[in-house]
Amino acid sequence: QVQLVESGGGLVQAGGSLRISCATSGLTFTSYGMGWFRQTPGKEREFVGAISRSGITTYYVDSVKGRFTISRDNAKNTLYLQMNSLQPEDSAVYYCAAGDRRSGSWSSFRGDYWGQGTQVTVSS
């Protein structure tokens, strides 16, 4: 049974930092690209970024580029999202996903397996 479990969400002040994790089990972690998405009430789920199987290649959407860093520990089957300079508009439920890119660019990443999400709230 494939499981992705996010943790580390919480409340942080604007300008602060937070690192969330995604522990996986039941899948061959190194066979999957991994991605992060976020969603706020009433809006569609938004792609945040992705990382290749080896961890060498990462992709970020413009709104988080330079502030967020995706990494993975293939020995621990765990994905991370380091978020710096957080702003209230970053508040959302953050989801991790195991999947792959659908074209040559990691911007086309699509998830096959999903976690349950972790809430990140940034206060102004």
Image: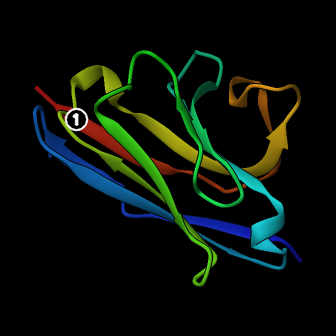
Residue at mark 1: 122
Q: In the rendered view, tell whether residue 121 sits above or below residue 11.
A: above
x and y percent of residue 39 in the render?
55, 29
Please give the name of the residue rendered at 23% of the width and 24% of the height, measured from the top-left corner: 88
x and y percent of residue 116 in the render?
64, 55
x and y percent of residue 109 in the render?
76, 33
Please give the name of the residue rendered at 34% of the width and 51% of the height, measured from the top-left corner: 82
Name the residue nearer the viewer: 89 or 78.
Answer: 78
Q: Can residue 36 be seen in this view?
A: no
Please give the name of the residue rendered at 28% of the width and 33% of the height, measured from the top-left corner: 67
Query: Callout 1: helix, strand or loop?
Result: strand
Q: Is residue 18 left or right of residue 63?
A: left
Please give the name of the residue rendered at 68% of the width and 50% of the height, measured from the top-left corner: 52
x and y percent of residue 14 in the render?
12, 32
Type of amino acid at the residue the image marks with label 1: Val
Q: Is residue 13 visible?
A: yes
Q: Is residue 63 left or right of residue 57?
A: left
